[in-house]
Image (cartoon, rainbow, N blue to C red):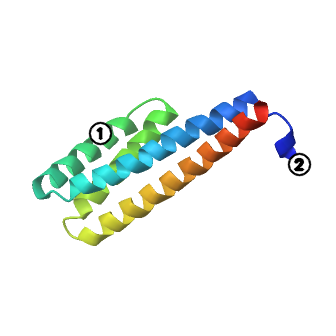
Amino acid sequence: MSDNYPSDPTELRKQGTRGVISTGAGLALWIVNGLFQIPILGVVLGGVLAALGVLGLLGKDRTDRSTGVILMAAGGAGLVSLVLPGFRGFLFGVGGLALVGFGLFNLFKFLRGLKSRS
């Protein structure tokens, strides 16, 4: 029933932004997962991400700290892959799939909302 009414522009904008960013982040997570599989580059990339995460934790904004935690977790997962190589691949693969799915769902809602506006 609610599909017959025009969508709120603010909500439509949020759905479009979430869709693009989530889909891009999921694809980027799969790319980083592939880079972690290169032996030397994986360790260096994990260390760099962990260091950037620590710098983000020192930020004053809430978004800086959130980004820092995410970067530290990604770097830590990359460094843990030295001991448990399958763990990182599974974690990044499932995380990328979830992000891409969430992004495509929001893009679908965005396109459906645009259609209802016309």
For the point 44% across and 38% down, which residue is it? 65
Q: Give the residue furthest to the left.
A: 40
Residue 66 picture location, percent across and down: 46, 42
Residue 78 picture location, percent across and down: 26, 57
- The local secondary structure at tag 1 comes to helix
User: Which of 99/61 is in front?
Assistant: 99
Label 2 sits on residue: 1
For the point 12% across and 58% down, which residue is it? 39
Left or right placement of residue 7 versus residue 13 in this view: right
- Amino acid identity at mark 1: Leu
Number of residues whose C-alpha sits closer than 10 Å to that of mark 2, classed few (under 14), some (14–19) or many (20 or more): few
Residue 15 picture location, percent across and down: 64, 39
- Per the rendering, the mark at residue 64 is none
Label 1 sits on residue: 52
Residue 18 visible to the viewer: yes
Q: Quadrant of residue 93?
A: bottom left
Residue 6 picture location, percent across and down: 82, 33
Q: Is residue 117 above or below residue 84?
A: above
